[in-house]
Image (tube, helix red, strand yellow):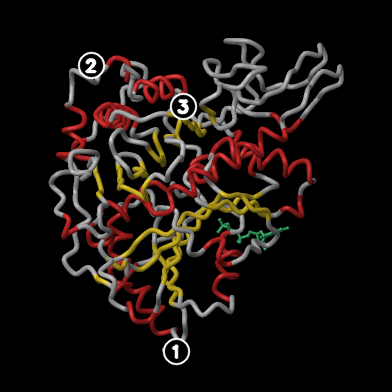
Amino acid sequence: MQMSTTLLPKSVRPAHLRVPGRSVCCLTAATRQPPARGATSLRSLPPPTTATAPRQRLVRRCAAAANDSDVIDVEGKVVDDRVPVTIITGFLGSGKTTLLNQILKGDHGHRIAVIENEFGAIDIDSDLVAVEESLDPKAEQIMMLNNGCLCCTVRDDLVKMLGTLYDRRSQFDRIVIETTGLAQPAPIIQTFFLEPSVSDRMRLDGVVTLVDAKHVELHLDEQKPEGVVNEALEQIAYADRVVLNKTDLVEPADLERLEERIRSINSMAEVRRAQRAQVPLDYVLGVGGFELERVEEQVMAESAHRHEHDHKHDHNHTGPDCTHESHKHESHSHDHEHGHSHASSSAGDKGTEDHDCAGAGCGHESHSHGHGHAHHVHDDAVGSVSVTIEGDMDLDKVNYWLGGLIEVQSNDLYRMKGVLAIKDFDKRFVFQGVHMLFEGMPDRPWKEGEKRVSKMVFIGKELDKALIEEGFAECVVKKQ
Ligand SMILES: Nc1nc2c(ncn2[C@@H]2O[C@H](COP(=O)(O)OP(=O)(O)OP(=O)(O)O)[C@@H](O)[C@H]2O)c(=O)[nH]1
């Protein structure tokens, strides 16, 4: 069955799709309304059966990833020959440059161009010239410096730099961008989807976030004024891969706790411990973090991380001296049910630990004991919510619900990925999104006897897990 009546925009002509069957939906800034927190709720939207407006809006705002010059391989498949780009982010002093140096010194044969983003009033063009002059023509790497902070100065700077770099395409085969420690990843990421001059020629391969094991908690715990972003939190939330660096400076127990906290913020990212940012090259390059083709493995990996976590926590806290340090998760009063897990969801592993703090002396500070009673040790408003449900989904309802969710919570919805079982479709549908950017396509066929299960993972700020669960459940086709 064709997907043209579904999440795919009708306006996308197949000949223009970069990958057959793929669509890119872009809810542009011009049409974007800032979410009215609290006032706007998905519940308050008209019921899906009576309103198709959100879906239509989704479709109308879709932009094709059109490129007439797509390369076709011998089997007739479209080859993605765009330059892969890796973003290295992480708080000040976390080890970004150390990682970059590792990459550049590595004996891997990749020719890597680097965009290093530093503060300071350096003129881009003259700096480029200076760099060019210093380049050995046979050198494998090109170093460019930018002025200003990528996330604060307009994206135009980055677009311009990428364009200039692209003119020397023959000199390199991938790009690495090192952001400043205070950069927010979102505008940089979005540049690769929103700017046609960039998205036609370059693809975002992955976001690698360096975490300073010694100091990260200080940064994560820092209370920011209303509306001010906690960069350390966001950098973890957007990551495809996390390098938990400087492990030599902390105790093993600290690392356990840190890993759990990182996973509670971002349950989809892989986390690897390191000293001096020493990680295998393929951990940071060739990640495919934004490839629809890899959504399934990433979504399933999320489950594996969660099960691993649940397994670790499958024990009791009954002793009077229980002071289990490693459970210091932020808890939302609405979703933290202690002592049982919800069968179909997790919220950054917050509130799903299957254990019991029955002892009077249990020093477990961060769990709420019963409804509405929460001990806030961390205030990681940023976290992950995953929902899994068996049975077929009603496509119209999914369109309506997801469209509404993206529209209402786009600012707070950082990344999302999912695999869906759509009624009457023999193929799975995979999608991924960043804020209001949304892209999806039919994936492989469901196998004979395979359970038709849909799963979505959302990473964002103050996500309402109960509301997401409820909306997702309402999309399931009701048995007659
Ligand atoms: N002890 C220890 N020091 C490290 C490790 N990794 C990096 N460093 C040191 O930490 C300092 C900061 O590392 P950088 O790589 O410059 O960090 P950065 O994130 O690029 O820093 P900014 O550019 O200031 O944001 C340097 O002195 C590094 O040598 C590590 O695993 N352990």
Residue in the picture at 33% in, 45% down: 427
Residue in the picture at 47% in, 24% down: 465
Q: What residue type is disc 1 on?
A: Lys
Q: Alpha-carbon distance for marks 2 and 1?
A: 62 Å
Residue under circle 3?
462
Which of the 4 image quadrants contains residue 99? bottom right
Which of the 4 image quadrants contains residue 312? top right
Residue under circle 1?
138
Q: Is residue 57 left or right of residue 41?
A: left
Q: Alpha-carbon distance for marks 3 and 2?
A: 23 Å
Query: Where does the N terminus fall, quadrant-wise?
Result: top left
Residue 433 shows in the view: no
What element does badge 1 sit on? loop
Residue under circle 2?
46
In the displayed structure, would residue 9 be above or below residue 114? above
Q: What residue type is disc 3 on?
A: Glu
Looking at the image, in which quadrant does ligand 1 appear?
bottom right
Q: Is residue 331 left or right of residue 123?
A: right
Q: Position of residue 84 (x, y in %)?
A: 39, 65
Q: Position of residue 92 (x, y in %)?
A: 57, 52
Disc 1 within 8 angstroms of ligand 1 (CB): no
Q: Nearer the viewer, residue 390 or 55?
A: 390
Q: Alpha-carbon distance for marks 1 and 3?
A: 50 Å
